[in-house]
Image (tube, grey):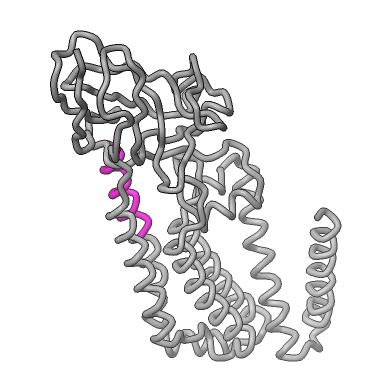
Amino acid sequence: MVLVWIAVVLGYLAGLGFTGAGVVAGDASVQDERWFAGLAAVGVLLVLTIVLRFLRINIGGLVVGKDKRLSTSKLQALLWTYTLVGMLLAIVIAKWIGAEDSYTALIDKGLPEEYLILLGGPFAAAVASKAIVTSKVENGTLSKTSGKENASVTDRLGEAFSNDQGDTDLVDTQYLLFNFVALAYVIGGFIDDPSSGVPSIPAVLVGLTSVSAATYVSNKAVQRDTPVLTGLAPGRGRAADVVRVFGQNLLIPVSGTDAPYQELFVLFDGSEATILGVTSSDGELATGAAPGAGQPDHRPRHGASGDDRLFVEVPTGLQAGQVKVTVRNWKGVASEQADFEVQA
């Protein structure tokens, strides 16, 4: 990987030097002048990024949220910002060295209105999704896990295509790919004909990026991971008996903390049951291990139904007869109730 980066840097410097020599000597072609302006613009952006880093301004903080995960919407906004700034820098530098046609075209035509949508859309999506997720976390209908503190570049980029659980997310992937296509069109069009200024973008690409941004925000709005109780086994028992609880979103991992799972309460007619543990690799009770113990074989296990499974102890002091069992998360959001028969 280091050798690849060295080759890229040397290739960049060779191209900049070759085109720059002609510009300095005054015998460069218009094409060489444009290539020099483009390469110089890339260099200016890189130097600016390095200077900001040197000043201890965390560039990664522009795209990594407080949850230490790469934000898909923030990444889009940053890519469009760098792309547009790079093109404008190339146009200005080209004017300085005598290739004024692209500058003249920009002044005459102005900036195409589509760029306002492509710049504002990702920013609006980032703000809206942040507000939605924050609200859901505060009211307990969504859990926000944390990413790795010092994730590798590969892991960090993978977060742009995945949800908080690390699974590839179709909506995020669609949002990224449509924008990548639009970015490729813009960059390719500018390289192919810089004399026309900033290239226009087809309405179909603007529409696809806009729809994918709206879908991205809508997906944030419908996401929920409140506890869902799907069943008990057995459905009857005495005080202190062990009962297996089945459900979804019963054990939400919490990355970056000492507790591997969010706090959860299983209630029998309001009486809190003791959580003994979750299923072990063989599907039996992992004795002596409540959530929080952190041993690998005590992590939640999922059956064919995808349900979480854990073991609880029926509380003492309950009256014989039918009681209602519910699961409540750390914010007090409860699942639907299930019936359990307490035997004398």
Q: Residue furthest top?
A: 317
**Along the line of sight, the residue nearer the viewer: 86 or 264:** 264
Residue 212 in the image: x percent, y percent?
38, 70
Residue 208 in the image: x percent, y percent?
40, 78
Residue in the image at 48% along x and 45% along y = 165
- 295 left or right of 133 in image: right
Magenta stretch in the rendered image:
125-138
**Along the line of sight, the residue nearer the viewer: 343 or 58:** 343
**Along the line of sight, the residue nearer the viewer: 42 or 264:** 264
Q: Magenta stretch containing residue 136, yes or no? A: yes
- 200 left or right of 193 in image: left
Residue in the image at 45% along x and 56% along y = 74
Q: Residue furthest front?
A: 344
**Along the line of sight, the residue nearer the viewer: 112 or 278:** 278
**16 vs 203: above or below:** above
* Count of numbered circles on the image: 0
Image quarter in which the N terminus is found? bottom right
Residue in the image at 36% along x and 73% along y = 210
Q: Main secondary structure of the magenta part?
A: helix
Residue 324 in the image: x percent, y percent?
17, 28
Image quarter in which the C terminus is found? top left
**269 vs 304: above or below:** above
**62 vs 147: above or below:** below
Q: Quadrant of residue 275?
A: top left
Residue in the image at 80% along x and 63% along y = 9
Q: Magenta stretch containing residue 223, yes or no? A: no
Residue 76 in the image: x percent, y percent?
48, 63
Q: Quadrant of residue 158?
A: bottom right
